[in-house]
Image (tube, rainbow, N blue to C red):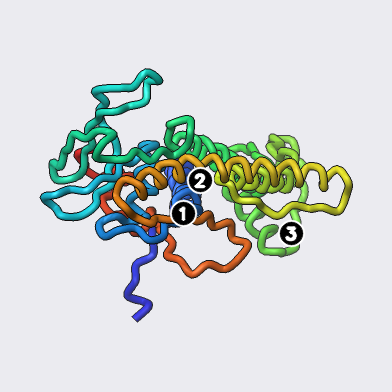
């Protein structure tokens, strides 16, 4: 039965490999971003995966009750029409799929923000994915270069003989060249050395650093080496940075959730999943199980 599944084609085009690598890096980061905060006790109609995806891509989601649908709805803002003295939106329009639109205000709905900066996480995630992709592809380039080493220039009359000779060497065969052919070959052959310094190990270190930086951005305290005094100080600073990023996301959501609970008499609770303890919760894999396909190239949406 397993043989009936089709494997994806091997990618031998460098440009396509770079694009596919970027997509996979972005999906991995997106999966982290939409899973670090879990919503508990949501009323019927509201799904954590939908709320977190709107917060990730749009930076906000409006929660309200629809009397016609007879359920709670969460959708992003697509237009603002009134503001208070601080510039905070008090009247706005939300939009969903299948032509759904609704004009709301602060008396019948609540805005949840991704952060106090009022911006989405998708842009920073794209930047992180780009840096990770560049590091991986640079490593690929250097590894490929280790296989080439030299470019050999010989007369056309000796090309096949030299190719056969190189193949025998690659297959671990001994080889001999009879004189005077050896002298002719030596005089007519030129070799261009293309071998670069081996830096893949350094790129691996940088790749790990970038992932560490990404985890901190999503509020996840990653494990670091604490064997020296310097590393202990660095780890403490990075732990505080991760905690600050965690609270930046959690506090902005919590303010909106508190207003929602008060306005609609609910008991929604937020929980940050830092991975330090096992959690029995559903994970949202947007790259594989998207509902509506916000991040898909072939998606058609009204938002």
Where, by quadrant of the figure, is residue 158 drawn?
top right
Q: Are marks 2 and 1 in contact (CB under 8 Å)?
A: yes
Q: Secondary structure at mark 2?
A: helix
Cα distance in 3D space between marks 3 and 1: 71 Å
Q: Work out which residue is located at the far left of the displayed protein and give it.
A: 68
Label 2, on which residue?
Answer: 250
Residue 89 in sight in this render? yes
Q: Is residue 78 left or right of residue 139?
A: left
Label 1: element kind: strand
The residue beneath circle 3 is: 175
Q: Position of residue 143 (x, y in %)?
A: 64, 48
Among the 4 quarters of the image, the one containing residue 42: bottom left
Q: Position of residue 183 (x, y in %)?
A: 77, 42
Q: Residue furthest bottom?
A: 1
Which residue shows up at 58% across the image and 44% down it?
214
Residue 292 got which mark? none
| Mark 3 or mark 2, earlier in chain | 3
- Name the foreground residue: 40 vs 215: 40
Does any portion of residue 9 appear in the rendered image?
Answer: no
In the image, taking residue 61 as reference, residue 187 lies left or right, namely: right
Is 28 rendered above or below residue 188? below
Which residue lies at the image location 71% right of the left edge and 46% below the top edge? 205
**Camera-nearest label, 3 or 2:** 2
Q: CA distance from mark 3 to mark 2?
A: 69 Å
Image quadrant where residue 294 sits: top left
**In the foreground, 135 or 112:** 112
Classify mark 3: helix, strand or loop: loop
Residue labelled with disc 1: 270
Q: CA distance from mark 2 to mark 1?
A: 8 Å
């Amino acid at each position: 039965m397993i043989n009936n599944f089709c494997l994806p084609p091997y990618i031998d085009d460098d440009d396509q490999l770079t694009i596919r690598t970027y997509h996979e890096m972005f999906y991995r980061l997106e999966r982290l971003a939409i899973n670090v905060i879990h919503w508990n006790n949501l009323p019927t109609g509201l799904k954590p995966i939908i709320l977190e995806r709107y917060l990730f891509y749009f930076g906000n989601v409006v929660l309200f009750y629809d009397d016609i649908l007879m359920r709670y709805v969460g959708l992003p803002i697509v237009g603002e029409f009134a503001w208070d003295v601080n510039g905070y939106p008090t009247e706005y329009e939300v939009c969903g799929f299948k032509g759904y639109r609704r004009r709301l205000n602060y008396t019948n709905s609540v805005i949840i923000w991704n952060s106090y900066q009022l911006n989405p996480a998708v842009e920073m995630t794209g930047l992180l994915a780009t840096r990770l992709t560049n590091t991986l592809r640079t490593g690929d380039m250097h590894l490929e270069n280790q296989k080439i080493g030299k470019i050999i220039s010989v007369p056309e009359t000796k090309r096949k003989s030299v190719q056969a000779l190189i193949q025998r060497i690659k297959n671990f065969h001994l080889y001999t060249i009879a004189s005077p052919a050896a002298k002719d070959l030596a005089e007519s052959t030129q070799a261009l050395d293309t071998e670069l310094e081996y830096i893949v190990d350094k790129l691996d270190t940088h790749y790990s650093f970038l992932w560490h930086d990404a985890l901190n951005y999503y509020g996840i305290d990653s494990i670091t080496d604490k064997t020296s005094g310097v590393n202990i100080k660095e780890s403490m600073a990075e732990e505080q940075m991760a905690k600050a990023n965690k609270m930046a996301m959690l506090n902005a959501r919590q303010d909106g959730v508190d207003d929602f609970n008060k306005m609609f008499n609910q008991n929604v609770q937020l929980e940050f999943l830092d991975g330090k303890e096992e959690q029995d919760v559903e994970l949202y894999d947007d790259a594989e199980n998207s509902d509506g396909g916000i991040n898909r190239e072939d998606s058609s949406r009204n938002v």
